[in-house]
Image: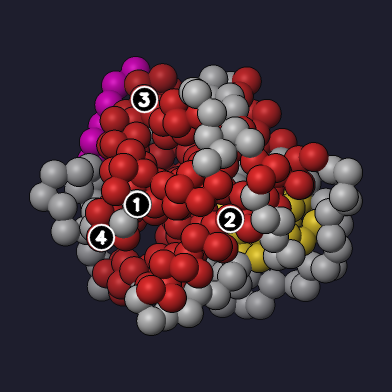
């Protein structure tokens, strides 16, 4: 992936080295790739059901309305290749969604992306690195510990810069859902007592839509920048496949339990990303209206 062709975003906040101490779970509704991956391991070590932990964390996302402590607005160092990569991907998501929103006579509001190490405070509470990348709707910011990319490659076999770009784009997809009112509707359904988990549950549909929105971004970026190289698309599909509910359950429990799904199967995650990538259109991402996911 020739990511250096991307415009660098000014909305990356470098909070590495200034995060709070302590170790407890927290995070936002957007914990998908990192949350699923690492919570599985932590859950096993704690002797708890990883999917139950995921459900609890997802439910906590809407309960905290306290403003987050202000992060120091430090810009990443110019010679930091990892942060340069993040700025490039974030910048192109901004260009993509500004264009799509403008074409629909709406205005896209850029989110901030906070780089942290170890742990971080957000409007969704304290989150340590085990939660992985997440989006917090309370402050409309994405949070990323760059060590997750190493975890993604070494533990889950999902290597490559386009796999990492997919991670970021998925979290931005949750921001798009917030701006479009999708997240608010899911929250209302949760408060009304509607079941969130399950193979056809709202959490699965919400996560699969974020995968599809990541695909829409990838289509737009490739159309404008022509920056993908052979094998890049496979990297993203491999990352989506690596963290499907069925695959993780099979690895950790030895059996698949669809009633406890929160993110969708490996095949579904890859399929919805591909649907967004192939069409490049927001209308292709109606996971809530789809009869078959």
- The boundaries of the magenta stretch are 253-259
| Above or below, 33 relative to 101 | above
Q: Quadrant of the N terminus?
A: top right
Position of residue 211 in the picture relative to residue 222 (left or right): left
Task: Find disc 4 in the rendering and name its residue.
Answer: 283
What is the quadrant of residue 58 in the picture? bottom left
Give how far apart the Cα atoms at labels 3 and 4 are. Answer: 28 Å
Q: Quadrant of the C terminus?
A: top left
Report helix, strand or loop for mark 4: helix
Task: Find disc 2 in the rendering and name its residue.
Answer: 92
Q: Are marks 1 and 3 in contact (CB under 8 Å)?
A: no
Sequence-earlier tag: 1 or 3: 3
Sequence-earlier tag: 4 or 2: 2
Give how far apart the Cα atoms at labels 4 and 2 are. Answer: 20 Å
What is the quadrant of residue 11 in the picture? bottom right
Identified at 80% across, 40% down, the residue is 81
Task: Find disc 1 in the rendering and name its residue.
Answer: 280
Task: Find disc 3 in the rendering and name its residue.
Answer: 247
Q: Are marks 3 and 4 in contact (CB under 8 Å)?
A: no
Q: Are marks 4 and 2 in contact (CB under 8 Å)?
A: no
Report helix, strand or loop for mark 3: helix
Q: Can see residue 61?
A: no
Identified at 31% across, 56% down, the residue is 281
Local packing at callout 4 (Cα closer than 10 Å; few below 14, some 14-19, many 20+) is few
């Amino acid at each position: 992936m020739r990511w250096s062709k991307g415009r660098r975003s000014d909305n990356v906040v470098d909070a590495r080295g200034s995060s709070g101490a302590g170790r407890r779970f927290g995070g936002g509704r957007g914990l998908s790739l990192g949350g699923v991956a690492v919570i599985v391991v932590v859950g096993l070590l704690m002797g708890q059901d990883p999917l139950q932990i995921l459900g609890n964390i997802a439910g906590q996302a809407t309960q905290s309305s306290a403003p987050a402590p202000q992060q120091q607005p430090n810009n990443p160092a110019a010679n930091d290749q990892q942060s340069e990569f993040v700025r490039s991907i974030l910048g192109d998501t901004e260009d993509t969604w500004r264009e799509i929103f403008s074409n629909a006579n709406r205005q896209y509001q850029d989110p901030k992306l906070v780089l942290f190490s170890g742990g971080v405070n957000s409007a969704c509470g304290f989150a340590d690195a085990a939660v992985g990348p997440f989006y917090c709707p309370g402050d409309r910011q994405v949070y990323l510990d760059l060590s997750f990319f190493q975890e993604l490659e070494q533990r889950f076999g999902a290597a490559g810069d386009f796999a990492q770009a997919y991670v970021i784009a998925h979290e931005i997809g949750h921001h798009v859902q917030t701006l479009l009112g999708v997240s608010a509707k899911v929250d209302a359904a949760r408060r009304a007592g509607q079941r969130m988990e399950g193979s056809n549950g709202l959490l699965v549909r919400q996560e699969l839509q974020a995968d599809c929105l990541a695909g829409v971004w990838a289509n737009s970026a490739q159309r404008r920048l022509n920056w993908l190289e052979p094998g890049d698309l496979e990297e993203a599909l491999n990352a989506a496949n690596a963290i499907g509910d069925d695959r993780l359950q099979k690895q950790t429990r030895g059996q698949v339990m669809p009633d406890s799904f929160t993110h969708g199967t490996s095949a579904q995650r890859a399929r919805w990303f591909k649907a967004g990538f192939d069409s490049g259109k927001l209308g292709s991402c109606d996971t809530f209206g789809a009869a078959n996911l």
